[in-house]
Amino acid sequence: MKIKANNPSLKSWVAVSPESDFPIQNLPFGIFKTDYLTEGAGVAIGEYILDLTYLHENGFLDGLGLPAGIFNQLYLNSFIGLGKKLTRRVRNRISELLNINNEELRDNKPARELALIPMKEAVMLMPVNIPNYTDFYSNENHAANVGAMFRDKDNALMPNWKHLPVGYHGRASSIVPSGANIHRPKGQLMPQGAEKPIFGASKRLDFELEMAFITCKENGMGNPVSTVEADEYIFGFVLFNDWSARDIQFWEYVPLGPFLAKSFASSISPWIVTADALEPYRTKGPEQEPAVLPYLQYEGHKNYDIDLEVHLQPEGSEENLICSTNFKYMYWNVNQQLAHQTINGCNLKIGDMYASGTISGPDPGSYGSMLELSWKGTKPVKLTNGAERKFLEDGDTIIMKGRCQKNGVRLGFGALRNTILPSK
Amino acid sequence: MKIKANNPSLKSWVAVSPESDFPIQNLPFGIFKTDYLTEGAGVAIGEYILDLTYLHENGFLDGLGLPAGIFNQLYLNSFIGLGKKLTRRVRNRISELLNINNEELRDNKPARELALIPMKEAVMLMPVNIPNYTDFYSNENHAANVGAMFRDKDNALMPNWKHLPVGYHGRASSIVPSGANIHRPKGQLMPQGAEKPIFGASKRLDFELEMAFITCKENGMGNPVSTVEADEYIFGFVLFNDWSARDIQFWEYVPLGPFLAKSFASSISPWIVTADALEPYRTKGPEQEPAVLPYLQYEGHKNYDIDLEVHLQPEGSEENLICSTNFKYMYWNVNQQLAHQTINGCNLKIGDMYASGTISGPDPGSYGSMLELSWKGTKPVKLTNGAERKFLEDGDTIIMKGRCQKNGVRLGFGALRNTILPSK
């Protein structure tokens, strides 16, 4: 698939620094508001947000077949639900409007000034209303690390792990965007050796570095989506922090899985980077052995080469890079996840979120959670301010970043940043 | 609390047979449509649906402070989100309008004929859009039966079970109303003694008899709801069938809980019986030993005395009563469930659904699933047509019913009825 808007030679008349996540080849969609504009859809370009409501109302998107009011909304669900054929056409048209050689906006100063909102004047909001959220567990390094810690090293993976992408239903209501701060959750904790649980704030609060995809098409109940068809259902991706209270989880999760250990909060980066923009960064996945059942087989490159980082910033101190990994380290890819999710006839909704599971690389510096980085608290992580961490402390800010680079183009997700506040 | 509309001496000018689930003391809310009316809200009375859109548009609900268009909607979310003070006032006004001594509708033939829709002309739809769905596991008989089958009889309950209402996030998208038929799901099955899983239709398809409550108020992230406050959050109840594919579940559920074994479908009865209507049927819950943590303690009667039945109707044959139980057999009550759900700060949405977990009584005839009734397939259930069942077969219809009776009043939920179709 050749997508015009991805051409590495494209340049924009909007100045974009080489360090920006948002060159003209990216054009991710989000929902923003300012002191002077109500909630609506925008596209990131350099340090600006292109106001899609303004463009649409002023004729710059005429002829694309867009319904009236499609961008002047609280969420992108109606827009992405138009289908990838049309949303791709919109992205191509935006690329054209921002192209250095296109005079339509470039030379129309009044329109340009109304259409481009400085990011620093805007607040980014949840990009979609999320009807359903699934969290997978599709990274082998992470599953093996956790298995080795809590079971034994030689049988780290459960017998089902290489046969199906293990996943569970998560809580949609508590998914919040970058910038939302998160109170340390309280709950039941079972101290080692105690006879009964105590109540208190989690002492083992953790992040989990994940990516999530968002669906833009409904299959209807009873209709599985194949690994081939999956591409038409996946609108784009965000960074995902699956905040986890390990001590709450340890006590509650047998036999029905994680519940309150996760549902206090998850957070996402606010710009949805389209699957189209990520097309050039597709890469081969791992060999899957034993062979998977036919409904999970796939052709082509379905993994993505996206560099991922986690930074921990203690209150009043600087950012510490504590994890460098890559989305390519997934054992199960997103097409397989969606095929598995629907093989029983389960119906997808527009705006559903499907998170990858913690993304750990092979080396200790590439582990995607404190649980693994500090190996269950036995190897504290040293910080530049002299402190160390087994798990997260109040005042800590976790910053996640994701970037792709190829053919001189670099694009990214913008930062996902949340601070831990004391429990209420 | 004394609720005017619950008075046992009330009678309606609408004829209500003694066997009806919908006397004037019930007045449950639902969403219906007919060949001549688009989707909208109604209240059940005898064999009729009182069309709330008509009543509202024609002044019969004036003075209550209801927004325009509140009933002319696809779902009841906006209505129940008005809060229990106002929705209770609406129920009281409907009770007044239907009262045998009230002439407003009774003696206004044209209005009466437009306001009362025969149930047989209507299709009942999903009453609410469900943003989040949790399934609890709060019945001790069921948990002990399952534990005894799959672990051992002397340690049937997990160590956490009596300390917290175990629950997990379920799939909201695939919850369907009574009347929707359900295709047998396909998925990965691990035959006993096999080395690798096979793909196929579930051979161990089951129902689970549950009740579910629906929330009508938002707490906001970070704000736990106490067991006392919970009453203001619970609008009403429906019957809930937590369809389960036991063989899919057995292979997939360790370590993150049930996923595809449940997400192919759940079903609910279409009338929401208000918590107000159920007030007279409150009853004492079991002694909880060991004592629960303070946030789970409660005062008063928070269980409900609701007789529940499951009928299995093989294709072309008659209904077989296979389970008689009662909602009073819950170890954890709904106020405790909601307090637990929110103790970590998890936010509730209007229309959320919280299911009880399978409701089994102490005796074999009161078990709420085929898994328990046939004791894992070892004691087939005999049917009147000479056949027997270990699990469900294609063409089987499962009918669930729920009823309360006291002071000469009998009210119920209407039937929840779904038929199993062959896998696609």
Image: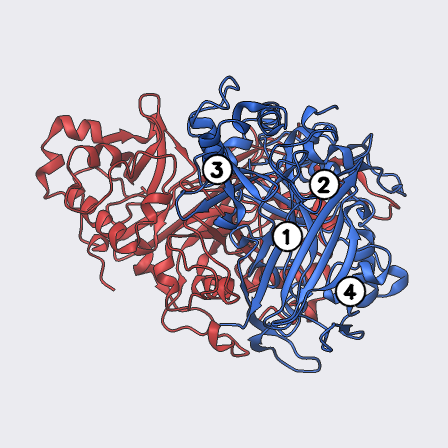
Chain colours: A blue, B red
Residue A337's disc number: 2
Q: Which residue is mark 4?
A: A372
Report the chain holding disc 1. Answer: A
Q: Nearer the viewer, residue B4 or A360?
A: A360
- Check the image and report above or below for B216 versus A2: below
Separation of residues labelled 3 and 1 (CA atoms): 49 Å
| Nearer to us: label 2 or label 3 | 2
Q: Is residue A177 left or right of residue A157?
A: left
Q: Which residue is mark 1?
A: A415
Q: Is residue B378 visible?
A: no
Separation of residues labelled 2 and 3 (CA atoms): 32 Å
Separation of residues labelled 1 and 4 (CA atoms): 22 Å
Compare marks 1 and 2 and give the one earlier in the sequence: 2
Separation of residues labelled 1 and 2 (CA atoms): 25 Å
Callouts 1 and 2 close, C-beta under 8 Å: no
Report the chain holding disc 3. Answer: B
Residue A408 position by quadrant = top right
Q: Which residue is mark 3?
A: B417
Q: Nearer the viewer, residue B422 or A104?
A: A104
